[in-house]
Image (tube, grey):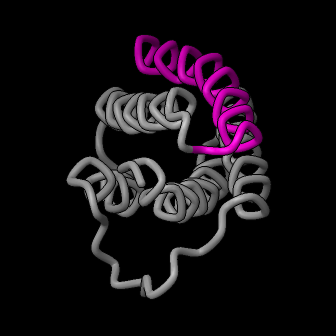
């Protein structure tokens, strides 16, 4: 079993944290364009989490301990909570951190795409998410530049 096989359920949890974060962010911002972007990010994560949840079998004996197996996943699991705390900070820093988190997630899902230990369906779902995330991350980086 590979690292990405062990971490798929963690990635689903992290995606669910991202859904909650971006739904809240969409409500907080006054800019309609940003609100729409955050809503689209939440939707992409929601679709991914729902579809992967149907394909991923829970790992036997694995309990939700809050501790992620890999250091990158551990960082990502805390990222959205950290972003919530930083919300009042400077917009450019906030968008920079969001883009960084989303970029790390995108790279992690790219590893899933390349991992042949996963089913074809899981790899396709991860690839679809990577494609959507790439477009949305470009928009997020554009927000960073204009902030």
Q: Is residue 122 above or below residue 82?
A: above
Q: Looking at the picture, how far across and down is residue 138, in whole percent?
A: 55, 14
Q: Image point 31% across, 66% down: which residue?
A: 68
Range drawn in magenta: 118-147
Relative depth, front residue between 30 and 110: 110
Q: Image point 52% across, 56% down: which residue?
A: 8
Main secondary structure type of the part rendered in magenta: helix
Asked whether 124 falls inside the magenta stretch, the response is: yes
Q: Looking at the picture, how far across and down is residue 23, in whole percent?
A: 67, 55
Left or right: residue 127 compared with residue 113 = right
Q: Image point 36% across, 50% down: which residue?
A: 3
Q: Is residue 69 above or below residue 52?
A: below
Q: Is residue 39 visible?
A: no
Q: Looking at the picture, how far across and down is residue 133, in whole percent?
A: 61, 27
- Quadrant of the rendering where the C terminus is positioned: top left
Q: Looking at the picture, how far across and down is residue 84, in whole percent?
A: 40, 59
Left or right: residue 109 compared with residue 52 = left
Relative depth, front residue between 33 and 54: 54
- So how many labels did they put on this image? 0
């Amino acid at each position: 079993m590979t690292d990405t096989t062990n971490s798929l359920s963690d990635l689903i949890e992290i995606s669910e944290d991202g859904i909650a974060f971006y739904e809240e962010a969409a409500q907080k911002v006054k800019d309609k364009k940003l609100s729409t972007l955050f809503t689209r990010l939440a939707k992409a994560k929601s679709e991914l989490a729902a579809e992967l949840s149907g394909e991923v079998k829970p790992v036997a004996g694995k309990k939700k301990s809050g501790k992620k197996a890999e250091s990158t996943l551990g960082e990502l699991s805390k990222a959205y909570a950290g972003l919530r705390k930083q919300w009042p900070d400077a917009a450019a820093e906030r968008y920079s951190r969001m883009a960084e988190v989303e970029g790390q997630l995108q790279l992690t899902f790219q590893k899933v795409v390349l991992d042949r230990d996963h089913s074809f369906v899981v790899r396709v779902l991860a690839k679809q998410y990577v494609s959507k995330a790439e477009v949305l991350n470009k928009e997020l980086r554009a927000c960073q530049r204009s902030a």
